[in-house]
Image (cartoon, rainbow, N blue to C red):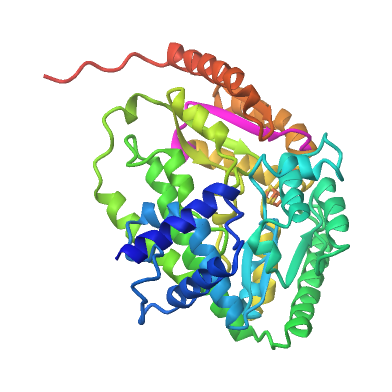
Amino acid sequence: MIVAISLREMWLRLAERDGYFNCGFATAAEKTIGDKMAKCCANENDRDPSCGSAHATEDPRGWFGNMIQNCHQYASAAKAAGRPIVCIMCEYTPRELILAAGGVPVCLCGGSAKTIPAAEEHLPANLCPLIKSTFGYHVLKNNPFLEMADLIVAETTCDGKKKMFELMAESRPMHVLELPQKADDDDARQRWMAELKKFRVFLENRFDVEITDERIREAIALMNRERALRRELAALMKSDRPPLCGRQLLEFKSVISGIPADLRQYERALQQLRQKQPDTDVSSRVRVLMTGVPLVHGAERVLEIIEDSGGLVVCMENCTGLKPLLEDVDLYVSDPLRALADKYYRLPCSVMTRNDRRLDVLRGMAEDYRPQCVIDLIWQACLTYDVESHRIRQLAQQELGLPYLRIETDYSPSDSARIATRVEALFETVLAAAPAAAPPSL
Ligand code: SF4
Ligand code: SF4
């Protein structure tokens, strides 16, 4: 028992010392511990009690609180078993194809401010922090997932990401996945389908596997299940008195998709939260719909400020929220690759033109989640979300009748006080306009 605790503490110390992603092993002794944990954690029926890891029997919040460590163990075990690690940086990449090739799809998006100075030695300072943070890990070689990657998928979404990938490709194996950007154009959709066909063949050749339709269908079923569970968790926020806050909901995610233990924990979380009594102060908080850029792991600061200022983020439209979960892939069509192409091409990201679907999604969310205001988060120098904020403001204020706040920031906490002041002013406006609460019935 003493051994188990100390090993676990060592993991936590490593994670703390090096940041969220850099829990890599510095010494041979630590490497041995990692191998032991990887072996144990990959085998649910034969646990090693001295492993010290958080296993799926834990409370869901404890499990996802250890998400990076869990994913590292899972990826290490998978890699040791011969499965390729494939890093992606965008929700347009169908993870199902990677899973069908036997690979482990890992989200590479960086959320740490600590790696940005290293990135700025190569990239312009006036670039999105998500891109700089990710590239900083590449420069510093301190993202263990990137260091074990057999392939990186470079999605051609925004210009900054596209050009950053060119620099990364100088020393990392990469496949460019071209995303056409006319949202409702048939030729563009055909082009996307051709790209996915090429990606399938590339994966087959690269990893010497056959990606059969059957394997794609199995991967679709797994990802549909994961999406459904996460959608159900998000739907708990529709209640007048949700059993959790937005920050807690955001914890229920993983940088690796399709981990069976994660799915069991999503199920367990749903069971527990459906029975949980909400906190008494929840209904007095201002209900917020957050939209805009993704809040990747480590970059949750603005959400925390909103909830520390009296808000309750009931709905997140962004890529770390509901956007990629809204639709499943049709399992019952004759061509599963076509089904993947259709689902992913409908993703309403601001890199698309026109991106009317995002407005439709926001209309639906406003109806289902009944927010009292909209907060649009823009990472500094993210031009597509920044320009699109004009249409989101119009939609919120003129059509939905909701107060709107645009927050442009980066990963540095230097403007936290200013953001809090603006959020508080927004909430004062909301509360001043809200009808007085009904007196308690006698
Ligand atoms: S916001 Fe757009 S570019 Fe970024 S991950 Fe989502 S779909 Fe990809
Ligand atoms: S937040 Fe904007 S600029 Fe940054 S990677 Fe996503 S789309 Fe590109």
**Image quarter of the N terminus:** bottom left
Foreground: 292 or 129?
129
Say which residue appears at 52% left-offset and 68% top-offset. Answer: 73
Residue 223 at what x, y percent from top left?
A: 53, 68
Magenta-colored span = 367-382
Which residue is pictured at 65% across the width and 86% down the height? 212
Residue 291, placed above or below residue 373: below
Can the viewer see residue 202 in this picture?
Answer: yes
- Report the residue at 54% width, 55% height from top: 325
Q: Residue furthest top?
A: 432
Q: In which of the image's four quarters is ligand 2 placed?
A: top right
User: What is the x, y in percent for residue 252?
Assistant: 45, 52
Q: Is residue 390 left or right of residue 172?
A: left
Residue at 53 percent across and 17 percent down: it is: 426
In the figure, is residue 57 to the left or right of 73? left
Please tell me in which quadrant of the rendered image residue 174 appears: bottom right
- The x and y percentages for residue 131 are 75, 46
5 displayed left or right of 424: left
